[in-house]
Amino acid sequence: MDKKHLIMGTAGHVDHGKTALIKALTGFDCDTHKQEKQRGITMNLGFTHLDLPDGNSVGIIDVPGHADFIKTMVAGACGIDFVLLIIAADEGIMHQTREHLEIMNTLGIKHGIIVLTKVDLVDTELIELAEEELREFVKDSFLENASIVKVSSVSESGMDKLLQAITDLFEKIPQRSSEGAFRLYIDRIFSQEGFGTIANGSVLSGSISKDNEVYLLPGNKELRIRRLEHHGKEVNTISAGDRASFNLVGLKQKDFTRGMVLSDREIKETRLIDAKITIFQPDVSLQLWSQVIFLLGTSRLMARMHLLNKNSISSGETCLVQIYLPKPIIAIFGDKFIIRNSSGDLTLGGGEIVDPYPLHHRRRRKDQIDIVNKLSSGDLKEHVLAEIRKAPLPVLHTNIASKLNIQPDDLIEIIFRQLPGDIVFHQTESSILLMQKKFETTTRNKILTGLQEFHKKNPLKKMGKTFNELMGIFGTEQNEITKMTLKLLLDDMQENGKLKCTNKSWSLTSHDVKLDKNTQNLVDKVESYLQDIGSNSADIAEIQIAIKEDVDEKKLRQVLNYLVDKGKAYFLQKKYFHHDFVEKAKQQLLKFLKQNPDGISVAQFRDIMECNRTNSMIILEYFDSSNITIRRGNYRFLTKKFVESRKK
């Protein structure tokens, strides 16, 4: 049976014995910094692990309790699976105790144990009163039914009961899923002689192996993993719920800024998020626009917050907001965060990201707010619809899944059975392309209108527009997505009888070239002229003079294009040649090169064809572009590809 990977954290007021408790449990002192030893309080995150009697090992994060270090507490709590809420029996519930409980509630922690420490300092009656106070304190929180364990870190009384309580709770908590994107907020980075840069953190989701690519985000800097460690031992794979240590090649400490993430894939950064927040700080009221400190993972940023569905919000109330960040962060739907006041001395509340890549909502339009409200429900279908509707172009279902950090197959049921009428999809062998119905309709109309105009301008041209020419309907938005969109729509329109494809060009099914008597006479006269000039060529002005017809240039050009389409003429370097001359030139060339393997010069070809040097150059360059000949110095030879094709 695979071992479970979980992380336990501590929480509680400063000097209530969190670090001493961890030392009594594990034998490891999490106060490793000199300044912490001097001050007697934990300022930084401390890390160790506890080996359980059943063979499992739980990672431990000792977070600071002092008010100044809430940002560090949030950084540690983002990866915690369960918590020990620690209250000293001689002091009871304090301000930071309440603040930590609210933060853990907001960050979505679901499991925990209440630990009453320093019981050796008080009598039995005070311990009983403390227990009653605790039960009332945690009512309606995730710790409402949690065990209360009484311990003394000095005498180590109650430690066996606490160890058993941790073991029992560990068995009940489900393992985090290793599906989706691998993400780890770096909460500690340092250099070690002989190894280089080491980055530590708690794995939020996914898994990664030593031979996988890893990216530093934001910035998408690709790194190489030299060594992976879990609880001090080298491993090949790290999964969700692990404390992990990465020895990285390509990362220097100067490249790192607080809030950066390690991931197994490139994730789009964002400076704007939609979220649902709740204010839990008493006697606080926030107006339409607020300046707040935004804490997500290890990020701590001053941000502007805009209320969307209310004009103000007070303690106990929930609201939809849009948060403007001063620099890019990595955020995913469902991530939990904390907000503090702008001076950083008061935790106001927190919330959950409902859209990491939203549209701007400065005007608070009702239809946009309705979408955000639906997203806040957590309904997967609403998230899929929002991603399609806010995108200016079609989107792949795999990209939607990546943004939502789920598997693409999780969207199949929604796509095939639950999409409303304003959304359509087209399936390929490897993916599904989704778009708004109005986008599809507009694109189809652009294709049809463009071909109608083309046929109107070129009534004698059998061919239509090539794929690349049709891509012009997308203007500057010509990319892999629009290429896929055009291909799918062209195939669908051909299957439905709207279009036809001839020689890699698209035309309307209704388009047909028909010549009236006058046009046919003009076609015959132009072709006869080109045939008569033999080895010479003519441009359109020369042809217009030679045929002695009162015909405008536009009509004459249509006739010449018709002859080119029919294969009776060639248009090369703004000159027209009759088909018979070009074909004769090809045969004479082949005959000469068969007898003269040393190649043919321009002068030799000119003499054979009895034409001028300019036309000789034009024809030979045409043969080069057609892969019949290849030029080496002053001579031309048959290409290997052409020779092999003649053998078949």
Image (cartoon, rainbow, N blue to C red):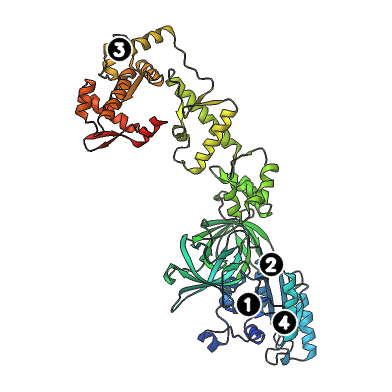
Label 4 crowding class (10 Å Cα cut-off): few <14, some 14-19, many 20+?
Answer: some
The residues tagged by marks 3 and 2 sit, at their Cα atoms, a distance apart of 84 Å
Front label number (3 vs 1): 3
Front label number (4 vs 3): 3
Q: Which residue is mark 4?
A: 163
Among the two numbered marks 4 and 2 on one chain, the one whose residue lies closer to the N terminus: 4
Front label number (2 vs 1): 2
Tell me which residue sits at (65%, 58%) in the image: 319
Report the amino acid beneath label 3.
Answer: Tyr
Report the amino acid beneath label 4.
Answer: Leu
Q: Which residue is mark 3?
A: 529
Dots 3 and 1: beta carbons under 8 Å?
no
94 or 35, which is in the foreground? 35
Q: Which residue is mark 1?
A: 60
Q: Is residue 108 visible?
A: yes
Tell me which residue sits at (33%, 33%) in the image: 625
Q: Which residue is mark 2?
A: 175
Q: Is residue 364 visible?
A: no
In terms of image quadrants, where is residue 460?
A: top left
464 lies left or right of 63? left
Q: Is residue 431 magenta?
A: no
